[in-house]
Amino acid sequence: MVAAVGMTAGQDATSSSSITIVGQGDAQITLQASLTQLPSLSVGQTAQVSAPGALGTIAASVTQIGILPSSTSSPTYPVTVVVPDAPPPLASGTSVQVAVDTKTATNAVTVPVSALAMLGNGRASVQVANGTSVTTTIVGVGAIGDGRAQVTNGLKAGQSVVLADLTSVFPSNESGSTSSLTGRGFSGGGGGGGRFGGSR
């Protein structure tokens, strides 16, 4: 499929003039992962690719993880993701977003991520509502994705939790001024994952 014609009818072509042709087959996407992201990645993991002009996400998988950094100044490691039978929006040179599924969970107790205050080391605090009282509970956190988080311990199915009101305004120490409360987002899809930028 001819994707672009870099020439004008009636004018002489130059050495930089080109016609871009999108061939059939697999598309290979190269990501750059940081050293902290490497332990969460492995060959065979599924991924979703978002490309300009594509309707929805495109299924892909991790096929290779480099063990040598791409540069020494800011160490990142090349990760290869392959899209089988790639559609035209994944033409060569396209910049895309890739979400790699690093964790999955089935039959899990989950809460909206806005209910959690992350503490690190897979733990978070959550406010549990019981009638008119609210208590703070420490819970274990597993997979995170699609706006929800898996709770591995500390909560039971059916309990009510307090969600953050991201539109509320809280008072500041300065007279006559207010500040907006904003929430921390979690990226990822398919039960939890890291989000990377990549190019083919």
Image: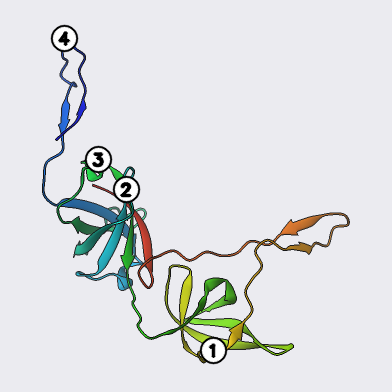
The spot of residue 176 in percent (x, y) is: 87, 54
Front position in the image: 197 or 99: 99
Mark 4, mark 2: which one is toward the viewer? Answer: 2
Q: Amino acid at mark 3?
A: Gly
User: What residue is rendered at 57% in x and 71% in y?
Assistant: 114
**Quadrant in which the N terminus appears:** top left
The Cα–Cα distance between marks 4 and 1, rounded to whole angstroms, is 72 Å
Q: To which residue does mark 4 refer? A: 12
Q: Does residue 68 appear in the picture of this structure?
A: no
Upstream in sequence: badge 2 or badge 1: 2
Q: To which residue does mark 3 refer? A: 93
Coloring scheme used: rainbow
Upstream in sequence: badge 4 or badge 3: 4
Q: To which residue does mark 1 refer? A: 158
Q: Amino acid at mark 2?
A: Ala
Q: Which mark is residue 51?
A: 2
Front position in the image: 135 or 122: 135
Q: Which mark is residue 186?
A: none
Q: Residues within 10 Å of mark 2 (few under 14, many from 20)?
A: many
